[in-house]
Amino acid sequence: MHRFLHQIQRATVSSWEAVAGLVYPEVCVFCTSDLCQATARSPGVRLCRDCEAKFADEGAAVCFACGAAVGPNLPAQSECLECRTRDFRFQQVIRLGLYEDELRTAVIRGKSPGALPLSAALGELLYGMQAERLRDANVDLVTFVPQHWGKRLVQHHHQAETVAEILAKRLRLPLARWLLVKKRHTRDQSDLPRSERLKNLTAAFGVRRWPRVRGRNVLLVDDILTTGSTANECTKALRAAGAKAVAVAVIARVP
Ligand SMILES: [Zn+2]
Ligand SMILES: [Zn+2]
């Protein structure tokens, strides 16, 4: 039933792409300035060079495990101080930039109705900037942090799903759209104090019967990583279902 409703009412990247050339003029999907495709980082990125530069903190030192900004002296692939004392079940976080300034505005706007082209462009830019790490993660399939079905019914598109669709396409991997399920409604993590965030998520996610997850490496996609609790809860569910390892990819990491 849910799958049927999903199919009839939700926009997908492919349906958007089919009409994009006819309907959308060649402008940046964020700032609407003229877009010269020749300057875009990858053919699918419908963002101008200025926006690209603002969204991706290219060359910044990051924690391999959680995507947080770290000092320039931390060796590649090492963890920040916080990660040394906490127990995330996912192996790494691959992200485009920090959830601040223009990227924060773009991610918030990307959730609004009709903003699928912006979400798709952010997904393309994430791939364009992090292709090497995404490939090195050696995953077998891509999935995303799900919404509760009640929310799916009313939302035009789910940003995490749009980004997952782009990454699966670019990595030439299957997108497991129905792998994770959100069993109950939870409050937005960013609205809650730290002490209530874990309680909010306890037993919120499950995995549908899907034998191919056993022994596989999974790429879990979301739009924002706040404390990492949501991604961690989803990872626990995936690992309990037999997944070998989980890597996380997000557009933005909350500083
Ligand atoms: Zn722009
Ligand atoms: Zn870290």
Image (cartoon, helix red, strand yellow):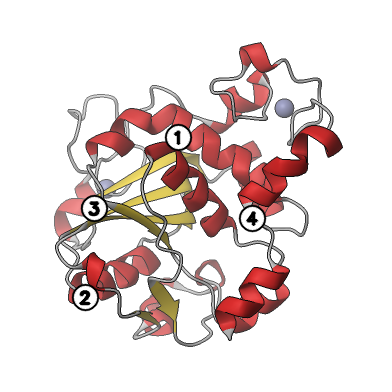
* Amino acid at the residue labelled 1: Tyr
Do the CB atoms of the residues marked 4 and 2 lie less than 8 Å apart? no
* Amino acid at the residue labelled 4: Thr
Question: Nearer the N terminus, badge 4 or badge 3?
Answer: 4
Is label 3's Cβ within 8 Å of ligand 2? Answer: yes
Front residue of 254 and 144: 144
Question: Nearer the N terminus, badge 4 or badge 2?
Answer: 4
* Amino acid at the residue labelled 3: Glu
What is the number of the mark on residue 127?
1
Residue under numbered circle 3:
82
Please provide percent x and percent y for residue 136.
Answer: 23, 35
CA neighbours of label 3 inside 10 A, class few (<14), some (14 to 19), many (20+): few
How far is mark 2 from mark 1, CA to CA? 27 Å
* Amino acid at the residue labelled 2: Ala
- The answer to whether residue 15 is left or right of residue 233 is right
Please provide percent x and percent y for residue 32.
Answer: 81, 30
Residue 120 vertical position relative to residue 174 in the rendered view, above or below = above
Residue under numbered circle 4:
12
How far is mark 1 from mark 4, CA to CA? 18 Å
CA neighbours of label 1 inside 10 A, class few (<14), some (14 to 19), many (20+): many
How far is mark 4 from mark 2, CA to CA? 28 Å
